[in-house]
Image: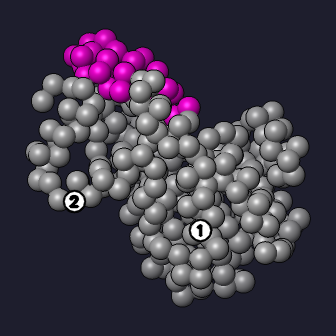
Amino acid sequence: MTNKTALVTGASSGIGEATTLRLQELGYTVYGAARRADRLRPLAVRGVRPLTMDVTDDASMTSGIARIIEETGQLDVLVNNAGYGSYGAIEDVSLDEARRQFEVNVFGAMRLTQLALPSMRARRSGTIVNITSMGGKIHTPLGGWYHGTKFALEALSDCLRLEVKQFGIDVVVIEPGGIQTEWGAIAADHLKKTSGSGAYTAQATAVASSLSSEANGRRNSPPQVIADAIGRAVTAKRPRTRYAVGFGARPLIAARSLLPDRAFDTLIARASGVPT
């Protein structure tokens, strides 16, 4: 594979870093984007093109896409991976923080997609990969705003797939399960700050422990399993619309589709260690 270009957001660690390197192995010219340029230096040493980008800053995204088109003439793959988990009781999370969660996880991804599509349409080819989560299909206590962003990204991806098929563009959703990244610890810290005292203290303590526990880390899958799935998707002649990959993803998504709401509530509550 030659002369193909990919952009991966949230590339400085975890899934983004692994995906960047996997696409490079497949022969892509890869731009790895993150807010902090210093965290991209290890990738730059390995030949990845670093791109300082904030997905909540329109000028940053516009200039980033323009640079890619100017330097390579095309953008074949966009991997919308940047995101974070803002955990806390729906009652406790400020609306400013809720809006930021949507700005990063949803609007940033969709704005980059808008910017990437004209070039893809002109060439009548391209693949947009949206990293949602098994959390875009299931729900957990104290993750309401986060799950809301992932449910939204799932729906937007489905609509987008129908819209751009006529231009030869594929839209792929990746639904990670438990992955060995910084995500769980960061979400747990945010949860404790937001709902660690007050009416939801007991739930917050249990869920934070579940998110950041050492045992959970041992069970979780390495980021490479997600990178490999993305590699398969972007090189497939007819990629699947969804790839549920990583610890717990397939069984939990299946359980959500099979169990009544309250039965699933009980299953998730017990897994999270909260009272049922």
Q: Which residue is mark 2?
A: 257
Tell me which amino acid carries mark 1. Arg
Residue drawn at x 68%, y 46% is: 17
* Res. 22 visible in picture: yes
Give the residue furthest to the bottom. Answer: 166
Specify whether residue 200 is painted magenta. yes
Specify whether residue 185 is painted magenta. yes
Q: Total of numbered circles in the picture?
A: 2
Instruction: Please tell me how crowded label 2 is: few (under 14), some (14-19), or many (20+) other residues with Cα within 10 Å.
Output: few
**Residue 107 to residue 84: above or below:** below
Residue drawn at x 49%, y 26% is: 185
Residue 163, percent from left and from top: 48, 79
Residue 256, percent from left and from top: 23, 54
Residue drawn at x 25%, y 34% is: 271
Q: Which residue is mark 1?
A: 232
Instruction: Please tell me how crowded label 1 is: few (under 14), some (14-19), or many (20+) other residues with Cα within 10 Å.
Output: some
* Along the viewing direction, whichever of 266 and 153 lies nearer the viewer: 266
Residue drawn at x 41%, y 31% is: 216
Rendered-image quadrant of the N terminus: bottom right
Rendered-image quadrant of the C terminus: top left
Label pair 2/1, CB-CB below 8 angstroms: no
Residue 10, percent from left and from top: 64, 45
Which segment is the magenta one? Answer: 182-210
Q: Secondary structure at mark 2?
A: helix
Spatial CA distance of label 2 from label 1 is 26 Å
Identify the mark nearer the N-term, 2 or 1.
1
Q: Main secondary structure of the magenta part?
A: helix
* Along the viewing direction, whichever of 228 and 98 lies nearer the viewer: 228
